[in-house]
Structures are given as structure tokens and as C-alpha cells.
Amino acid sequence: AQKVTQAQTEISVVEKEDVTLDCVYETRDTTYYLFWYKQPPSGELVFLIRRNSFDEQNEISGRYSWNFQKSTSSFNFTITASQVVDSAVYFCALRSDSWGKLQFGAGTQVVVTP
Amino acid sequence: EAGVAQSPRYKIIEKRQSVAFWCNPISGHATLYWYQQILGQGPKLLIQFQNNGVVDDSQLPKDRFSAERLKGVDSTLKIQPAKLEDSAVYLCASSLEAGLRNEQFFGPGTRLTVL
């Protein structure tokens, strides 16, 4: 069975602070993909990053970076120098089903105040 | 390139009424998904189509929910009769093909309120 846990319900920061979102996943499959999506107040889910299970190299993309550790089944996501526009709900998701079904976590609300 | 289109954006109905949602995926995308997102939760897959065939409807409450994608392009999701617990945002997504690598693109969703 697949499961994604986002233990943080809400994180509040002041602009320019860094924000790290935690994600822990469970799957018995050896091949899988992990995703982060952003859901602003408008409601549309916006794809941010994707990582496959064979590549644990951590990367930085602009103000976004992620830390993928298979040993702890974690896929954490960091926003550096947060901005008010980063205020949204962030979802971690797992895909290991061959048909591409996404299993989402419950989401973390990020509130960035000026 | 146009994104995934959904209508209506908002719908308010009373319990036991019927409602239908429409989705037009990105042109050329073979795979279409309907998700239900209850307030405070992550989206949950209701049904997945590959062209006009269903590949996963294990979490669709089939006694009241139905969906079709007759010509393998746009799709409708129907609830009949609606219950209070059906209040949620219904998201449609599409991808070029099914499978692990293919990115899913989401529409803006339809927010349903059942009174």
C-alpha cells in the first residue's frame, strides 16, 4: 500500500525566511516517483518538482530545493528566502502504480507574512 | 497551449439533487483523471481513463457517482443523488499517457457545496 504523510499542518514565516516542508512516504515498489505540488488560493494544482527513486541527488532550482533520502523514506522540500506569493498549500505526492495513480499527502499550509 | 478546462467552477445544490461536471483535457492527452479533494485533505483519485476505457475506479462510490469519456476526449462526472459529504472540489487532470513518468496537468476544479 502507498502512503504519504505530511506531519506539518501549517507553517507561518516572515518574508525572506527559509521554509522546509517534511514528507515521509511508504511504498513496497522499488520504482516510484515523488512530486511536490503547490495549490494557491485559486485552487489549481501547480507542479513544482519530480524525483524518481533511482536518483537521490539533491538539487536546487531557483529558490526551491529538495532533500530525497531513501534510507528514511523522506522527500523534504525547502523554499529559500520566502515571498508572500509562496503562501499556498503544498502537497507531496507518490506515484508507484504502473497506471500513474498519484497518492497525495494531506498538505501543509504555508503562510508568508510581509 | 490550452490547459485542462473544467466547468462549472462553482455549484451549490441541495442533498438528493443531481449534478454533473465537465472536463476537457489538454489536446492529445490520452489519460484523464478525476480527483475529489475534501477541505483540508489531499486530492483522492476517483477514476482514471485511458482513452475511453476505465483503468481504475476502485475509489469511485459507484452507487451514486458515474463518469464517462465516450469519445476519448472530454469527460463528465455525475453525482446522483448527492449527499452532504460530497461537498468538495472536484479536480480533473490529464497526461499524455498513463505511467510513472508522465506529468499530470490539473484543471482549476469545480467547487461543489451540498446543502
Image: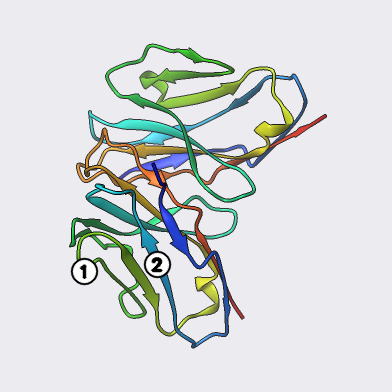
Mark 2 is surrounded, within 10 Å at the Cα level, by few (under 14), some (14 to 19) or many (20 or more) other residues, namely some
Q: Residue at x 48, y 43 (%)?
A: A105
Nearer to us in this view, A60 or B23: B23
Instruction: Look at the numbered discs 2 and 1 and tell me whether their residues touch, using CB distance below 8 Å.
Output: no
Q: Amino acid at mark 2?
A: Trp
Tell me where residue A32 appears, x and y as whole percent: 28, 31
Q: Secondary structure at mark 2?
A: strand
Nearer to us in this view, B49 or A57: B49
Subunit that carries the residue with mark 1: B
Nearer to us in this view, B114 or B25: B25
Q: Residue at x 69, y 23 (%)?
A: A82
Image mark for residue B70: 1
Residue A95, compared with residue A49, is above or below; it is below
Residue A86, compared with residue A58, is above or below; it is below
State which quarter of the image contains the N terminus of chain A.
top left
Q: Which residue is mark 2?
A: B22
Question: How many marks on residues?
Answer: 2
Estimate the spatial distance between the alpha carbons at disc 2 and disc 1, rounded to whole Å.
12 Å
Q: Secondary structure at mark 1?
A: loop
Q: Quadrant of residue B71?
A: bottom left
Q: Quadrant of residue A113?
A: top right
